[in-house]
Amino acid sequence: MQVTLTVNGSKVSHDVEPRLSLAHFLREVLDLTGTHVGCDTSSCGACTVLLDGKAVKSCTVLAVQADGGQVTTIEGMANGQGMHPIQAAFKEHHGLQCGFCTPGMVMTAADILANNPHPTEQEIRHSLEGNFCRCTGYHNIVKSIQHAAEQMK
Amino acid sequence: MLTGKGRYTDDIKLPGMTHSAFVRSPYAHAKIISIDTSAAEKAEGVVAVYTAEHCGDYGVPCGWQVNFKNGETMREPQHPLLAKGKVKHVGEGVAFVIAETLAQARDAADLVEVEYEELPAVTDPAKAMDAGAPKVHDEFADNASFDWCIGNDRAEVEAALAGAHHVTEMKYKNHRVAPNALEPRSYIADYDVNGDKYTLYSSTQNPHLIRLLMCAFVLGIPEHKVRVVSHDVGGGFGSKIYHYTEEALVTWSSKQIGRPVKWTSDRSEAFLTDAHGRDHVVHARMGFDKDGKIVGLLADEFCAMGAYLSTFAPAVPTYLHGTLFQGVYTTPLIHLNVTAPFTHTVAVDAYRGAGRPEATYLLERIISKAAQEMGMDQAELRFKNFIPPFDGVNQPGYQTQVALQYDSGNYAPVLERGLEMVGYENFKKEQEEARKNGKLLGLGISTYIEACGIAPSAVVGALGARAGLYEVGHVRVQPTGKVSVFTGAHSHGQGHETAFAQFVADKLGIPMDDVEIFHGDTDQVAFGMGTYGSRSLAVGGSAIMKSIDKVLEKGAKIAAHKLEAAEEDLVYADGKWTVKGTDKSIGFGDVSLTAYVPHDYPEGVEPGLDFSSFYDPANFTYPFGCHIAVVEVDSETGRVQLKRFVACDDVGNVINPMIVDGQIQGGVAQGVGQALLEEVVFDEAGQMVTGSFMDYAMPRADDMPMVETDRTTTPCPHNPLGVKGAGEAGAIGSTPAVVNAVVNALAHMGVSDIQMPVTPQRVWKAMHANGNGKA
């Protein structure tokens, strides 16, 4: 099936199998390997991208379902200008260790801050419940998002 | 990584690359009657289908040998690349399908027809030693792989317990957990017929060891024809140390088909095939005199090996476990007896802490239970039994009853600081107040020690290791004074690129931007033993320090020549050699340029500024610390909420505090996970019923509070950086602290023990045992 969507501001059109997930479409077809796949049950959140401005787990969205949509991946976060404030906050606050969950965390953080620009610690923790991190104990991820919220005021 | 430019193995695409999928056993134990691959072979896109028939007798080896107490050699079954005749755990590979695309490989794998005859299985290590238990390997008399003991004479310890004023007893399971690094294992093998060479891209923690094991012990291919590359790795926690069958199989099959072969685990496969951790069934007794001094400790354990012996498996419940039974206490008599059975499960091997969390759990739970039984304060009982301070320089190291000699330690201050941080003085009042309001608060302490920086090769060799455990550090000063450092340690989240560059820049007095750290490629790095056991900085960093010393020594000769001064008159500071008492100096960059453009050069000195060193430490390092958890238990539902977590650790000198804190915070979350949430569960037939993230509960952001950290500093006396290692401490200290806190919250209801993971159901049952009814 033919799908046409806008990914990080560029229009792309490809013929894909109907069963191809958006995550695999991004990774295999578009070579946007910043979006990771950490599980097969939509539990870990490493594959989170923004679809029409909302955070979705791209492993459970079919590429054909995203037809006509606007997708932002980790590669498109900075919009060509170094780092997005959320990415910069993760760097400054050591919000990543192995880095595998990081793209999903950053995309989820973008969604959190878009809906709630001044979240409390508990609101951040609650909103991250769809994203696993096995390295950081979440401590510095929460701090990074708090800092990003400050920066984005 | 932050911008999507990480290079994980599954991100790599090679020209002509094929994809693969496994047919895996649905049974824990079954005879393979027949395998029909004909339909799969004809399926669209299929390149090859392999079974044990094709892989001959290739099998992956174990890297550690622990013999029976009676001298009988460790029972070591072959671990074939694909199951031969029988399957011995759910998930064992039976057939391997290679196709043009991943979807085609998976579709074709579904077409492989395997007929099985299911057999009874055993998954519990204690039950595996019952008479008549289903045998994992028919060729052995029973399921024991080995048995082992350490410490004082058993009869002496028994006698001490018989004469003790009080004996505390515990029977429990240190249950099995799954490491679950977020990046699933991934391998790509690329055979190049020109030169008969292989490149294996692997998500491994130790590329050189994988190359050695695979070449010398599995496939019999020349080591110098194989390059193992491990770029970014998405977490390991031990599970990516080992040489897995899939690594050898993709490498072998790449040559068979003459094309690159990729295999990436999915999460279900990860649960079924990544080595698990823990799984000890424990019976322990600790005796005390009337003043609360420990008089003896005796423990018997059944420790699962799984169906096959993984790379480090036999070391984990023995030399990484029994040797920690002294803890931080003066216990005069200790004996541990271990039986290590095969079970119809995936292998158990080192998982963050590896044997030391299990030792710490035993010690720290039993001492808190003893305090409760004897009506003593849990902190006071610890203070009473601490080993007095020793720095390993002015006072000798502390000789334990269980082989090791601690390097340096000062245990009371970490507990004092921990108590101060948590506000211990006021806690009892808060607890009573809360109870009046229907809230059950509990506080649990754990004062752990661990052995890191694994370790002196001669010692580990004597203990059964089939490898040395040194590290390699190579410092290449480029002509322009920029520095490339090659380390045999491997970074998969530990931040070596930062911490290593920091101390190199500091020692050389040059900007950090002038230093680049390289790791994870056997063609770049001379050799290495990889990263695990909190050894990277203590062992790998020390190897780099040795090479820096050599650089500075040679640099001084060149500087002396250029400055027309004697070497002994020079001092090196701030990136330059200066003639003492003068302003005559020459910078690091000028010296390095001279070394590579040696026109005006000292006689007899070779050009270049490039040194490699092997560092084999004199001893393990022994970090220690105090972890304190505060929990609130819901009196209606039994749900445990972790309110605070305080950690005062002593990891020796610290190079980068933010990285050390990050290691502690992450380790604590894993330890909390084991205490409250995580457990690999098998049913009677040996099926894993927790084989996905939907069924296996791991800590999420709202399960954790901020981790409050602080440190004391007792430098390691025997390595040049004075560092001890911080990677595992969090996972070691935290688990007993949390369970101690839960028991403390329920103590007034007569609860003195509870089995991990402390689920609401278990807490509710404990609250309602003894006819207690409500809180």
Image (spheres, grey):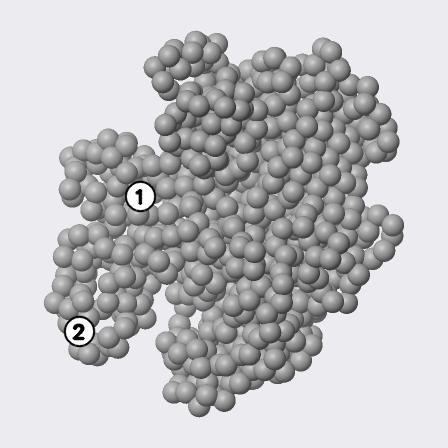
Q: Which amino acid does label 2 sit on?
A: Val
Question: What residue sits 22% from the left and 68% below the top?
Answer: A63
In percent of width and height, residue B741 lies at: 49, 25
Q: Which of B507 and B453 is in front in this view?
A: B453
Circle 2 sits on which residue?
Answer: A3
Mark 2: secondary structure = strand
Circle 1 sits on which residue?
Answer: A129
Which picture quadrant has residue A36?
bottom left
Q: Nearer the viewer, residue B262 or B565?
A: B262
Question: What residue sits 80% from the left and 27% below the top?
Answer: B333
Question: What residue sits 69% from the left and 77% below the top?
Answer: B57
Q: Is residue B646 visible?
A: no
Image quadrant occupied by the C terminus of chain B: top left
Q: Is residue B666 left or right of residue B652?
A: left
Q: Earlier in the sequence, mark 2 or mark 1?
A: 2
Question: What residue sits 50% from the left and 20% below the top?
Answer: B749
* Local crowd size for mark 2, using a 10 Å CA cut-off: few (<14), some (14–19), many (≥20): some
Q: Is residue A59 visible?
A: yes
Rounded to the nearest whole Å, what is the CA distance between mark 2 and mark 1? 31 Å
Q: On what subunit does the disc labeled 1 rest?
A: A
Residue B119 vertical position relative to residue B738 in the rendered view, above or below: below
Q: Residue furthest left?
A: A68
Q: Is residue B635 left or right of residue B479?
A: left
In percent of width and height, residue A37 lies at: 36, 60
Pointer 2 and pointer 1 on the same chain:
yes
Residue B165 vertical position relative to residue B176 in the rendered view, above or below: above
In percent of width and height, residue B454 lies at: 67, 44
Q: Is residue B668 left or right of residue B174?
A: left
